[in-house]
Image (cartoon, rainbow, N blue to C red):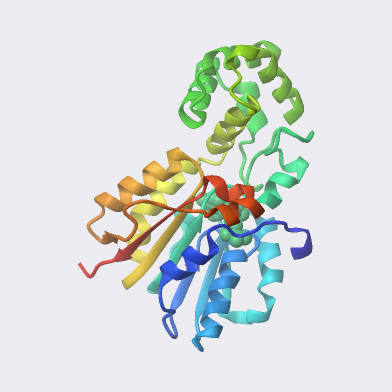
Amino acid sequence: MSSEFHHIPVLAKPLIAGLGEIVDRGFYLDCTVGGGGHSKLILEQAKAEGKNISLVAIDRDQMAIAAAQQNLIEYGDRVQFWHGNYCEYEPGAVKFAGIIADLGVSSAQIDLPERGFSFQAKGDLDMRMDRTEETTAADLINHAAEVELANIFYNYGEERLSRRIARAIVSQRPLHTTTELAQVIAKAVPGRYRHGRINPATRVFQALRIAVNRELESLETWLAKAPDWLAADGIIAVISFHSLEDRIVKHTFRQDDRLQVLTKKPIIAEAEEIAVNSRSRSAKLRLARRLVV
Ligand code: SAM
């Protein structure tokens, strides 16, 4: 499974540096384990420093959990897996020396047409990260009111033509596949509104994905809880991929008196990283330290 799970961890160096010296016998929490790329780097760093750590790895996608289990197999029971939404995790009495979240979807999820995340390959309109959950993108596209769809595209995709696109979708539904939806969007967006080379479906697909997975609500709920899961001086590190997420992380860190913000400005990828991994172009890393309050 791990050999099929293509995903290069972004901002790996600054993330590991940001966690600071690994705490011996410390607990670490990866809230978005994906293929286990970042978790593996933390475990390798611990090994290099001669430290013994335990790591809890969360993902709401069973496919990601399976891939990470393979990828981290050599670490045995030092890694515990938890399937679910990170905002619903309950750590009990454990306090973590480091908590990381690398938000959004993985390349592996995008690359599988049947997951429905990409408008470039034909697949069902699914977009659920957790396939045990009920609502799919098709449910929203085919049953939501026109105004609701327009609001989703405007609020989560910052799409200025949200109403026009929502009207076109409603007039053409039912729609079943990613490519059908992309075609309806393309027809609804006249050439003069197309900026640069960005496919007009990009923002609508991002918005739908955020809505289907309630991504921003999950992030807000989690950010309210996670500082209490940290040990004194523990570090929380969040990598976001669009301005909506980054704004939430920045403001919540700033307003939280349990935290000391360590990144006044977000850490972004260097040109060398962007050259080998285009996903890193939009990545922003923010770090904060748990204060003793
Ligand atoms: N850091 C990982 C790596 O290096 O392989 C990649 C993480 S990928 C960008 C994001 C992962 O987070 C996806 O596998 C996705 O299913 C998961 N995810 C996103 N939101 C989540 C949430 N609210 N709860 C749990 N997992 C979530």
Residue in the picture at 54% in, 16% down: 161
Residue in the picture at 70% in, 52% down: 108
Q: Is residue 213 left or right of residue 106?
A: left
Work out whether residue 60 can be spotted: no
Work out which quarter of the rendered image holds the N terminus and state it: bottom right
Work out which quarter of the rendered image holds the C terminus and state it: bottom left
Q: Is residue 79 left or right of residue 262?
A: right
Residue 146 picture quarter: top right
Residue in the picture at 62% in, 65% down: 36
Q: What is the number of callouts on the image?
A: 0
Q: Is residue 154 left or right of residue 132?
A: left
The residue furthest bottom is 50
Residue in the picture at 74% in, 64% down: 2
The residue furthest left is 293
Residue 33 picture quarter: bottom right
Q: Nearer the viewer, residue 118 or 69?
A: 118
User: Does residue 262 lie above or below 137 as drawn?
Assistant: below
Q: Position of residue 262 (x, y in %)?
A: 32, 61
User: Does residue 26 lie above or below 62 as drawn?
Assistant: below
Q: Nearer the viewer, residue 291 or 147?
A: 291
Work out whether residue 35 can be spotted: yes
Q: Position of residue 87 (x, y in %)?
A: 45, 53
Q: Position of residue 286 (x, y in %)?
A: 40, 55
